[in-house]
Image (tube, rainbow, N blue to C red):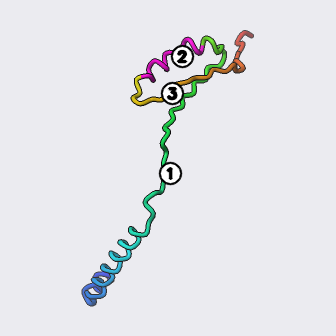
Amino acid sequence: MWIVRLALRRPYTFVVMSILILVMGLIAIERTPTDIFPNINIPVVSIVWNYNGLIPKEMSERIISVTERNLTTIVDALALCHRTRDSEPCQTDLRT
């Protein structure tokens, strides 16, 4: 309540403070750089499929070919490529 009483006793002080805050805000907006992010002209989409125990040939035939067919619907795509690598399969023997 004390700030309300102060504002009622000294109204010009609060008007001047409001104008000062407004002016300083406008100056700050004007001086703030607008280019915060770099220009990126080459968009890249990266999809990683990780199936342990699936050989690269099967991965290419079963998973990647289907994904590539779906990705060909992207407008203005310049290139589409894939790479399959042999990884160590994760095998678990549950027989005791």
How far across and down, in percent of the image, does residue 14 sit? 30, 83
Identify which amino acid the numbered label 1 is placed on: Pro
Determine whether 21 is above or below 95 in the image.
Answer: below
Q: Residue at x 63, y 12 (%)?
A: 57
Find the distance from the CA under tag 1 to the CA under tag 3.
Answer: 23 Å
**Few, some or many C-alpha atoms within 10 Å of disc 1 (few <14, some 14-19, many ≥20)?**
few
Q: Residue most toward the bottom?
A: 9
Find the distance from the CA under tag 2 to the CA under tag 1.
Answer: 34 Å
Classify the position of the C terminus by image quarter.
top right
What's the magenta region? 59-72
Task: Describe the element under mark 2 as helix, strand or loop.
Answer: helix
Identify which amino acid the numbered label 2 is placed on: Ile
Identify which amino acid the numbered label 3 is placed on: Ala
Name the quadrant containing residue 8. bottom left
The residue identified by callout 1 is 38
How far across and down, in percent of the image, does residue 33 sit? 45, 63
How far across and down, in percent of the image, does residue 61 sit? 56, 11
In the displayed structure image, the side of residue 80 where residue 29 appears, left or right: left
The residue identified by callout 2 is 63
Determine whether 17 is above or below 32 in the image.
Answer: below
Name the quadrant containing residue 21. bottom left
The residue identified by callout 3 is 79
Q: Residue at x 50, y 39 (%)?
A: 42
**Disc 2 versus disc 1: nearer the observer:** 1
In the displayed structure image, the side of residue 72 where residue 2 appears, left or right: left
In the displayed structure image, the side of residue 83 where residue 96 appears, left or right: right
Determine whether 39 is above or below 31 in the image.
Answer: above
**Disc 1 versus disc 3: nearer the observer:** 3
Task: Describe the element under mark 1 as helix, strand or loop.
Answer: loop
**Few, some or many C-alpha atoms within 10 Å of disc 2 (few <14, some 14-19, many ≥20)?**
few
Labels 2 and 1 touching (C-beta < 8 A):
no
